[in-house]
Amino acid sequence: MTVGKRYLMMKTMNKNTISGRTSAIMKKYDIRPSKRFGQNFLIDEGILRGIVAAADVTKEDMVLEIGPGTGSMTSLLCENAREVCAVEIDKKLIPALKDSLKEYDNLTIINEDILKTDISAVAEEKNSGKPLKVVANLPYYITTPIIMGLLESKAPIISLTVMVQKEVADRMISPPGKKTYGALSLAVQYYTEVKKVLDVPPSSFIPNPKVSSAVMNLTLRETPPVNVRDEGFMFDIIRASFNQRRKTLVNGLKNSGLSGCLAETTVSALEKMGLSPMVRGEQLSLNDFARLSDLILDSGSSGIP
Ligand code: SAM
């Protein structure tokens, strides 16, 4: 074996480094990263510390970690937070997590799908119902359903500090008129103040993902940035208009069968807003969608598609 190869091997097997710890846990518990569960384990200590710092975790906080994996970020969170609850879907990882993190008495590990977790109940049980901070290196295959689910659940959450694919990060912060603009942009910008914290290259994970990533910080707003009478209806309109991006907004809404969205109703609302009947959904700002939703409701035709 060459000196270079031996050095590399020693470096990866050194349990004092995050990558060494991860390799040792994977070996000990025979963990093979599962594509099905989007397992790309973070092995860059600087990035791990950057995520915990961006989440501004203190000894006052309860943190909900989604997908602890082999537990590298979990241990940092346990050291910095008052209470940590880690929800992991993969039952094969549970013994490794319980064993390697047994020194922390402020940690609860739940073997569950986060999409089915009742976060309000977790906050009630572990944090007297007070809001918690979500921190996660998210599984990329369900990033959008997780984020939309958390935002729409109205669960008591202060902030989400999450690693996502760069492409999803771009969608979160996208202004109108861009290809990246869509329902995720509008939901993130309506419910939160969003900022990018870090760019993360594929080499920071094992196995390396094919795409670059970014850490995003989303702080839940106390009051929304626009007034709208029926938030749920506005998001129904938003989803319907982006489901058929290539169509005009009028046709997209008409084809969606959404209650109250007759072509003439939408055309008349757009006229009142000074917009062309040929406009596409991707050209409307959050403010425009709020106004459109109110005008369609005002037209009183809801209930008859
Ligand atoms: N936090 C670890 C890290 O940074 O190394 C692992 C991150 S890995 C990208 C995503 C983790 O989420 C995996 O541990 C995976 O098993 C878990 N996961 C995937 N789908 C999940 C779901 N629906 N609910 C909870 N955890 C899930």
Image: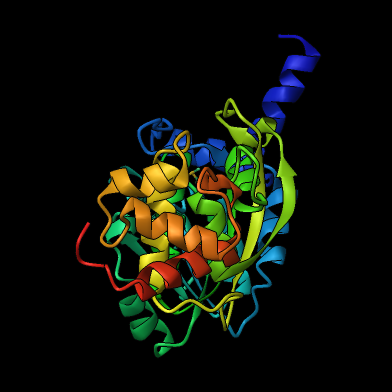
Location of residue 145 in the rendering, given as x and y in whole percent from the top left corner: 39, 51
Q: Residue furthest top?
A: 1
Residue nearest the viewer, comparing 93 with 210: 210
Q: Is residue 10 above or below residue 173?
A: above
- Residue at (55, 35) in percent of width and height: 23
Going by the picture, which residue comes out furthest to the right? 3
Image side of residue 277 versus residue 3, left or right: left
Would you say residue 185 is visible in this rendering? yes
Could you say which is closer to the camera, residue 224 or residue 3?
Answer: 224
Residue 36 in the image: x percent, y percent?
35, 33
Left-right relation of 125 to 51: left
Q: Quadrant of the C terminus?
A: bottom left
The number of callouts visible is 0
Toward which corner of the image does residue 122 lie, by quadrant? bottom left
Picture residue at 53% right of the left edge, 65% below the top: 272
Confirm whether residue 71 shows in the render.
no
User: Residue furthest toward the left?
Assistant: 304
Q: Nearer the viewer, residue 24 or 243?
A: 243
Q: Position of residue 89 (x, y in %)?
A: 32, 50
- Give the x, y percent position of residue 172: 60, 52
The quarter of the picture where residue 226 lies is bottom right
Dividing the picture into quadrants, the one containing residue 29 is: top left
Quarter of the picture containing the N terminus is top right
Residue 84 vertical position relative to residue 123 in the rendered view, above or below: above
The way the protein has been coloured in the rendering is rainbow
